[in-house]
Amino acid sequence: MQQTAATQRPVPAFLPINTLMLQAVKKVEVVIQELGRRGFSVVNIDMSTLSRPTVQIQTSARCAQLIESGQAAYYGFGLGEIGRYRQGQFCLDGCRVVWTENAN
């Protein structure tokens, strides 16, 4: 079956959303590298907010040090299947870095 010129739409060489996605991916790449240099383990990435992706790290003693020094803050508290928990966060190069720790 042959398509006519009227049914074919030109596709932009690079869609704007693709540009935003690539920028976010590059931002996350830089943050993951820096977190690795600082001794953190990345366990998840959420790019649903492209302007500020969220990188989840594994809880460590360094997280408590960031809280104590004022470089990070707790933003969430709750009670789940594993008991009481709290969530911490800090900003790094345009990304939100978060972790969850047991608060029992």
Image (tube, rainbow, N blue to C red):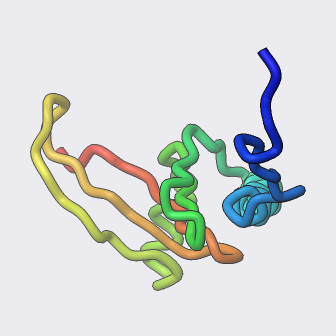
- Which quarter of the picture shows residue 87? bottom left
State the residue in front, 49 or 60: 49
- Is residue 38 visible from the viewing direction of this image? no
Question: Which x, y percent locates residue 55?
Answer: 57, 54
71 displayed left or right of 35:
left
Q: Residue at x 36, y 49 (%)?
A: 100
Question: Which x, y percent locates residue 68?
Answer: 44, 77
99 displayed left or right of 71:
left
State the residue in front, 43 or 66: 43
Q: Is residue 81 above or below residue 53?
A: above
For the image, the number of numbered tags is 0
Q: Is residue 65 above or below residue 68?
A: above
Quadrant location, the N terminus: top right
Question: Which x, y percent locates residue 93?
Answer: 70, 76
37 displayed left or right of 68:
right
State the residue in front, 77 or 45: 45
Looking at the image, the residue that sits furthest to the left is: 79
- Which quarter of the picture shows residue 20? bottom right
Looking at the image, the residue that sits furthest to the right is: 13
Q: Is residue 48 above or below residue 8?
A: below
- Which quarter of the picture shows residue 89? bottom left
State the residue in front, 33 or 8: 8
Q: Residue at x 76, y 59 (%)?
A: 15
Q: Residue at x 27, y 44 (%)?
A: 102
- Is residue 17 visible from the viewing direction of this image? yes
Looking at the image, the residue that sits furthest to the top is: 1
Quadrant location, the C terminus: top left
Q: Residue at x 55, y 41 (%)?
A: 44
Question: Which x, y percent locates residue 86?
Answer: 26, 56
